[in-house]
Amino acid sequence: MRFFNTEGPVRPEIYYCLPPLSRWDLNDVLGLIEREKYFRLHAPHQTGKTSCLLALMAHLNRAGRCRACYANLEIAQPAREDLARAMRAICGTLASAAQIYLGEDRLDGWIDTQ
């Protein structure tokens, strides 16, 4: 039985939801990615940003033209006054995301953790 989710990423197989990739102009986003342009997804709290990005990651990986993974970099926020600590946190998070979403372990040890 499916139900409504009120927090965290939506998993369409469990929760009622709008299809995440239908909530934005997917062709525009794919065009930005194709042209190697940065973009920012900005929206209010609890509006589906993470769910949309996870769906985009799955879409890109299914297409096979690139390898995408999702990483929440908020872990670096407490270390914003210590650049070296923040970068270690970011690199560690990226390495973990690559392992989780892509089965990729080449980023382990990517940055000196001393």
Image: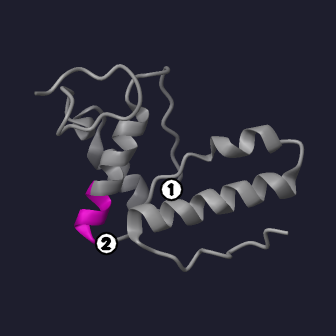
Q: Residue furthest right?
A: 81
- Predominant SS along the magenta part: helix
Task: Tell me residue 69's x, y (percent).
Answer: 44, 59
Extreme-bottom residue of the structure: 106
Q: Is residue 61 magenta?
A: yes
**Residues tagged 1 and 2 counted as in contact (Cβ below 8 A):** no
Q: In the image, is residue 99 part of the stretch drawn in magenta?
A: no
The residue at the point 40 percent across, 68 percent down is: 102
Tell me how far mark 1 sits from mark 2, CA to CA.
16 Å
Q: Quadrant of residue 65?
A: bottom left
The type of residue carrying mark 2 is: Arg
| Residue 68 seen in the figure | no
- Quadrant into which the C terminus falls: bottom right
- For disc 2, the neighbor class at 10 Å (few under 14, some 14 to 19, many from 20) is few
Q: Which residue is mark 2?
A: 65
Residue 57 visible in image: yes
What residue range appears in magenta? 59-65
| Mark carried by residue 37 | 1
